[in-house]
Amino acid sequence: MFIVTLTYIRPLEELDALMDAHVTWLKKHYASGLFVASGRQVPRKGGVILARSGDREGLEAVLARDPFVQGGVARTEVIEFIPSMTALSVEVLRGY
């Protein structure tokens, strides 16, 4: 599993101009099963994506195609972890 943090590096107006493309990109990777959860940080200085993948290089290639990254408005950091416990209701994480 991976925790991906996005840090906004440009004004929010520039980020908002790319939001529709970013959401389309997110939906594509939810549909593939790569992304499990995502959302804005509070305060709004970046975002977080929870991804399941055994392939860090593959994930980093996907992240490089994020419109926020391509547009130069955000940078990413990837943290890999192995879930040792989950809540029973988090079935999507089971078996990883």
Image (cartoon, rainbow, N blue to C red):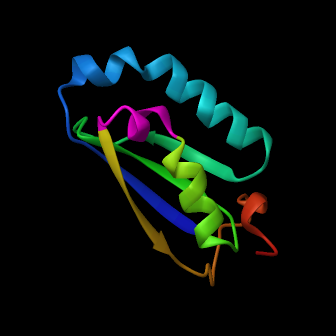
Q: Is residue 67 above or below residue 19?
A: below
Residue 66 location (% of width, % of height):
51, 39
Q: Is residue 41 magenta?
A: no
Residue 62 as seen in the image, left or right of residue 88 = left
Residue 11 location (% of width, % of height):
17, 26
Quarter occupied by the N terminus:
bottom right
Q: Is residue 64 above or below residue 52?
A: above
Q: Is residue 19 above or below residue 59?
A: above
Residue 81 as seen in the image, left or right of residue 78 = right
Q: Residue at x 31, y 25 (%)?
A: 15
Residue 43 location (% of width, % of height):
22, 38
Image mark count:
0
Quarter occupied by the C terminus:
bottom right
What segment carries the magenta color?
A: 66-73
* Quarter holding residue 89: bottom right
* Quarter holding residue 2: bottom right
Q: Residue at x 66, y 67 (%)?
A: 87
Q: Nearer the viewer, residue 28 or 3?
A: 28
Residue 2 as seen in the image, left or right of residue 94 = left
Q: Residue at x 78, y 70 (%)?
A: 94
Residue 54 location (% of width, % of height):
70, 74
Q: Is residue 68 magenta?
A: yes
